[in-house]
Amino acid sequence: MLRLDPEVYEALEKWAADEFRSVNGQLEWIIDAKLKEHRRTPGKSSRSGSEPVKNKEII
């Protein structure tokens, strides 16, 4: 569960709609972009043979 200020959620919802994404898809896109920007993408560590975790649900 993610708690957001209602005004922030509305802004996120509009942004997502403008880019033909769901709110969830928009959040994933934002998080992925920031992880790449800060070189923290999953599977890019020094561990050999590690695969990125896909569709991991956070509760």
Image (cartoon, rainbow, N blue to C red):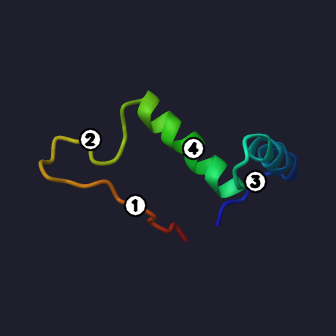
Left of 21 or right of it: where is 31? left
From mark 4 to mark 2, how far is it between C-alphas? Answer: 18 Å
Q: Mark 1, residues whose alpha carbon is within 10 Å: few (<14), some, or many (≥20)?
A: few
- Do the numbered discs 4 and 2 sit on residues whose CB atoms are within 8 Å? no
Nearer the N terminus, badge 4 or badge 1? Answer: 4
The x, y position of residue 35, in whole percent, is 45, 38
- Do the numbered discs 2 and 1 sit on residues whose CB atoms are within 8 Å? no
Give the labeled residue for mark 4.
Answer: 29
**Please, what secondary structure does the residue beneath circle 2 have?**
loop
Residue 24 shows which numbered tag? none
- Look at discs 4 and 3 and give the one toward the viewer: 4
**Measured along the vertical axis of the image, is residue 58 above or below residue 42?**
below
Left of 35 or right of it: where is 24? right
**Please, what secondary structure does the residue beneath circle 3 have?**
loop
**Please, what secondary structure does the residue beneath circle 4 have?**
helix
Residue 54 shows which numbered tag? 1
Give the labeled residue for mark 2.
Answer: 44
From mark 1 to mark 3, how far is it between C-alphas? Answer: 24 Å
The x, y position of residue 54, in whole percent, is 40, 61
Give the labeled residue for mark 3.
Answer: 4
The x, y position of residue 37, in whole percent, is 45, 28
The x, y position of residue 33, in whole percent, is 51, 35
Left of 27 or right of it: where is 41? left
